[in-house]
Amino acid sequence: MADNKKMVEAITSMDVDFAQWYTDVVKKAELCDYASVKGCMVIKPAGYAIWENIQNELDRRFKETGVQNVYMPIFIPESLLEKEKDHVEGFAPEVAWVTHGGLEPLQERMCVRPTSETLFCDFYAKDIHSYRDLPRVYNQWCSVVRWEKTTRPFLRSREFLWQEGHTAHATAEEAEARTIQMLNVYAAFCEEVLAIPVIKGQKTDKEKFAGAEATYTIESLMHDGKALQSGTSHNFGDGFAKAFDIQFTDKDNTLKYVHQTSWGMTTRMIGALIMVHGDDNGLVLPPRIAPVQVMIVPVQQQKEGVLDKAFQLEDRLKKAGFSVKTDDSEKSPGWKFADCEMRGIPLRVEIGPKDMEKNQAVLVRRDTHEKSFISLDELETKVSEMLDTIQKAMYDKAKAHRDSHTYEAVEWDGFVDTINNKPGFVKAMWCGCQECEDKIKEETGATSRCMPFEQENLSDTCICCKKPAKKMVYWGRAY
Amino acid sequence: MADNKKMVEAITSMDVDFAQWYTDVVKKAELCDYASVKGCMVIKPAGYAIWENIQNELDRRFKETGVQNVYMPIFIPESLLEKEKDHVEGFAPEVAWVTHGGLEPLQERMCVRPTSETLFCDFYAKDIHSYRDLPRVYNQWCSVVRWEKTTRPFLRSREFLWQEGHTAHATAEEAEARTIQMLNVYAAFCEEVLAIPVIKGQKTDKEKFAGAEATYTIESLMHDGKALQSGTSHNFGDGFAKAFDIQFTDKDNTLKYVHQTSWGMTTRMIGALIMVHGDDNGLVLPPRIAPVQVMIVPVQQQKEGVLDKAFQLEDRLKKAGFSVKTDDSEKSPGWKFADCEMRGIPLRVEIGPKDMEKNQAVLVRRDTHEKSFISLDELETKVSEMLDTIQKAMYDKAKAHRDSHTYEAVEWDGFVDTINNKPGFVKAMWCGCQECEDKIKEETGATSRCMPFEQENLSDTCICCKKPAKKMVYWGRAY
């Protein structure tokens, strides 16, 4: 790749400065840009196309489970935000307040939604009357605003795009089942489509969502060994229902409170894709989420018939259902190769006069840079096989990285040493009290990522206070 | 239909009170609801599913013309909004102002976007350098906020959903061509998919977009004879480019300003669907936009085999690519029929024991209530033909209504009389000066809807001042 690298301006090596490498990839792959609006993103076509694919695939999976999409207002009156005590405490410090409409001051100020529990509750209180009205399994795609002090593209910004599901159920059991069901949808989506392995588990009380009884999470590990919370699903029990008076008449003719859930996934998953799969040549996209799966690069395209042949291959691959483009620009093949790499296009098909003579094309994998020669008679089959191979290899590689960066600790010094010197997850036992969590965060910068569903008994005592352990926890520094 | 009407709570007849009929349909068809947030909508599943279909179909048509989707910030700093003089004058009085982020007052207040020209311009100024960077043909799907005083669901609300396209071009000619191209996309979409005939034309200076050189529009006519602006496309020339300093180096190595356009269509088209096609039984949706195209209603469903047969038909129709549901609820067939009607489902398939004996089903059209009996062997073909027939019939009916409610006037008294007594479009000649437009609006409540591309010479003098006429104009009262 040395030759190709010269063709495009080099990016910082990830081993030299991971944060700068990330910024370089975001910029050079043209995913997003900073706006004049401090802390907000301009999501550019290449970045937004990834988000559209995330939306389409998630939305399809949601609807298979009975989800219906709706749209709630962008504003929340202050009195509505304040109805649930924990919720307002969690969000009020980081919302944007609207105080004037047109030339007039508002009678009551409103915030731009940081999340929409209060709006859905307000609606459900008016709209749900009977057990026949349940369950409600609603979702919306929108942007939300949280007034963050420090921001990074896709990972933490004052405005981001997401979906937020909000459901209401007749029983606690049904709400819990839906909470877990949606966590499983997120996990399957991450692993099958984004090729990102995840740990499923529950958040500690300290880390759970403001107003939730239980928050479940999927946690993934970035290339630099830092964790990323990748999707959360909350069971509210009947806490919001009581605060908003959402009652229904059950079959037994008694009034009961509904049980609620909410769950969300955001544009930060684009950041996860970059940081799990990217390399020093740029972005690497899994075929199932890549807006362009195959780029055809004609070699010696000025020679008669080469461009025609390239377009012919493009047509064949399009008909076979692949997302494919031909780079017929005036740039050199070397420049085009490097450009494909920077943009993370999973598979490159090179075709030149010599290949045409032999009725062949060259396939080059983005993930491994491996070259192979295929007969044009087998184009569709081979491209299909290769994309499947890449998808699987990317998942396997990410999982191997995650597994080799997951450590165990059974005593305090080893725990601190691992956190400080071996970036990754550290599994360790915990007594269940927040004092230990606080101390761990203070002394190491690591937070509890989750109490995984798959528990192990590493020892009988808390890594911090040595009191009897209640849970095995994944700890780590996180984005 | 008398029997069925009894089954559901009746709605106001459109001839008695059109505004109340509209509100009733919005409510009973469960399209949207009022929120606790004054002037904002909660778009419910049945309404949002229509919007999703509008999005999918429009987005596909956009992308065929080379449009790329992006996402710009939700906020506009006041100084950015103020950069283009006409634009800020047009929008500043109706924006929502954010003055606080979290607990801190902002150094500069920001508005929630009422439209995003200024954000796109700010981005283009930084991102466009050379003729190689042109054209830029970007679009975003989002919500916008305009602080309206009086609101109506879908037609005028403080927040609505839309798409806004924003393009930059090297030449004035190319910008003009794109402006017209997108107007044509809107017109074709309305006529082919929504079955709503439109008049294409140009807005007068008084009615054009704040900051535009020229605004083109498609205008449709509602059942009550009032007009609805259904989509607009603006050519900005280089006005915004000069205000925001968006320059590029052209092939001849000189610096030039770009030429820009913008174009948008909104959730008010759901209002148009209601008011163009609806009747006293409720909503009537054209098959090509209906979230549910076919509802199967089992008759005597407690009899053995009936429900199985219904689900079998549902499966067959799903496999054939139709959007279909079966109403297997405990309600009576009569109630189900009326419910299908209220929700505007284009085609109802009834199947009962007697039909099964005869290997037949009953098809009932929503638009005409016509019944027909078909052999189950021909189910897919007949349903397909029937949906095509309905789509065409709905367009023809809407066009006949529009044509029969389009009048001509050549002298003032006749003009005023027509506006006052014959709801619809009135075609009349105009001298081109705003005084006459103002006088017409003041004395009749009618506004100039557009100067149609298809001009006719009805007379040589202005309907208002009798000076020489410049343009034939469609006039009408409008939503």
Image (cartoon, coloured by chain):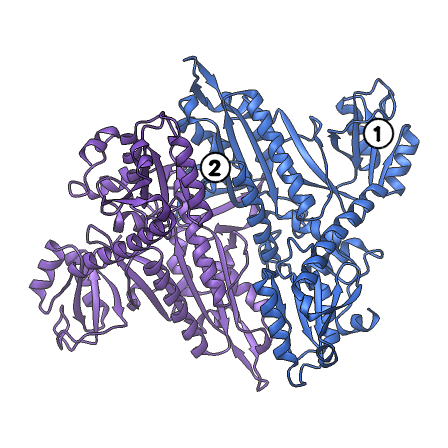
Chain colours: A blue, B purple
* Residue B391 image offset from top left, x and y in percent: 31, 54
Give me the chain letter of mark 1.
A
Q: Is residue A449 above or below residue B191?
A: above
Residue B82 appears anywhere in the view: no
* Residue B314 image offset from top left, x and y in percent: 42, 40
Spatial distance from mark 2 to mark 1, Cα to Cα? 41 Å
For disc 1, the marked residue is A428
Q: Residue at x 46, y 23 (%)?
A: A246
- Please identify the residue farthest to the left as the structure is shown: B413
Which amino acid lies under the numbered mark 2 shown in the image of this protein?
Ile
User: Residue B203, located in which quarter of the rendered image?
Assistant: bottom left
Callout 1 secondary element: strand
Residue B140 appears anywhere in the view: yes
Circle 1 Cα neighbour tier, 10 Å, few/some/many (<14 / 14–19 / ≥20): many
Left or right? Give the position of B392 relative to B177: left
* Residue A42 image offset from top left, x and y in percent: 59, 57
Along the line of sight, the residue nearer the viewer: B417 or A108: B417
Along the line of sight, the residue nearer the viewer: B222 or A96: B222
Circle number at residue A76: 2
Instruction: Identify the image quadrant of the N terminus of chain B.
Output: top left
Callout 2 secondary element: strand
Left or right? Give the position of B14 relative to B377: left
Along the line of sight, the residue nearer the viewer: B338 or B375: B375
